[in-house]
Amino acid sequence: MKVAIVDYGMGNLHSVGKAVERLGHQVIVAASQAEIEAADGVILPGVGAFGDAMKQLSQTGLDKVLQDVVTRGQPLLGICLGMQLLFDESVEHGNYQGLGILPGKVVRFVEGELKIPHMGWNKLQFKAENDALLAGLEEGYVYFVHSYHVLPTDRADLLAVTDYGHEVTAIVGRGNVYGMQFHPEKSSELGMALLESFLNNVVGKKQA
């Protein structure tokens, strides 16, 4: 299986790529439409600020490529900032439009109520255990590092949450599109199991 990891200058490409390779799949670090279209599945990683990331995606034309990925039915997984970019907008250091693939808004944790950033291991609570991504898995701990979180417009897109003073979106999914707010490649057994499930149960079944 060939997996494209989107390179737009703001991703944790190495760690995600190594995790995918450990699971037995071929990795392409992809910065062009042709490379992305040739892949069986696409991963959008991300570290940094939402506005800077959208600027990079727009300048390279990768924003349209990713929107086309979804239209074509290619499986797409956003990780951390990559998940947030899937949504309509963010208020990180201003107001910025996202990819608009999923409806919702990215907001900052409330100052003074919680330690920001949210950093460390938190337990997932599954909301849609019958989804292909979560099938056969048990709730457990994964590793988060973020100051902003997603408020999905449609709760049907919410596959798992965690608790950090209030309910926090952890995994989203709709059709061929998934997102994980945490870093699965740094989240021990459950993180790797979720990544493997995306590759085998989502990407693999699209191929069949």
Image: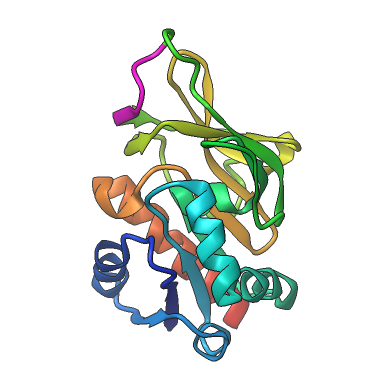
Q: Nearer the viewer, residue 58 or 17?
A: 58
Q: Is residue 192 left or right of residue 46?
A: left
Pinpoint residue 48: horizontal percent, then vertical percent. 39, 49
Name the quarter where the C terminus is drawn: bottom right
Relative to 176, say whether 139 is above or below. above
Relative to 163, say whether 199 is above or below. below
Identify the residue at horizontal 61%, vertical 54% (top origin).
Answer: 86
Q: Is residue 134 visible?
A: no
Name the quarter where the N terminus is drawn: bottom left
Q: Is residue 150 left or right of residue 195?
A: right
Colour setup of the view: rainbow
Q: Is residue 46 visible?
A: yes
Pinpoint residue 171: horizontal percent, then vertical percent. 53, 43
Q: Which residues are magenta?
A: 114-120
- Residue 205 colored in magenta in the image: no
Residue extending farthest top: 113
Pinpoint residue 6: horizontal percent, then vertical percent. 45, 72
Identify the residue at horizontal 25%, vertical 62% (top origin).
Answer: 15
- Residue 119 colored in magenta in the image: yes
| The quadrant where residue 165 appears | top left
Relative to 141, say whether 179 is above or below. below
Identify the residue at horizontal 51%, vertical 48% (top origin).
Answer: 50
Pinpoint residue 28: horizontal percent, then vertical percent. 38, 83
Identify the residue at horizontal 27%, vertical 75% (top origin).
Answer: 21
Relative to 41, say whether 196 is above or below. above
Q: Is residue 194 left or right of residue 186?
A: right
Q: Nearer the viewer, residue 103 or 3?
A: 103
Total marks placed:
0
| The quadrant where residue 123 appears | top left
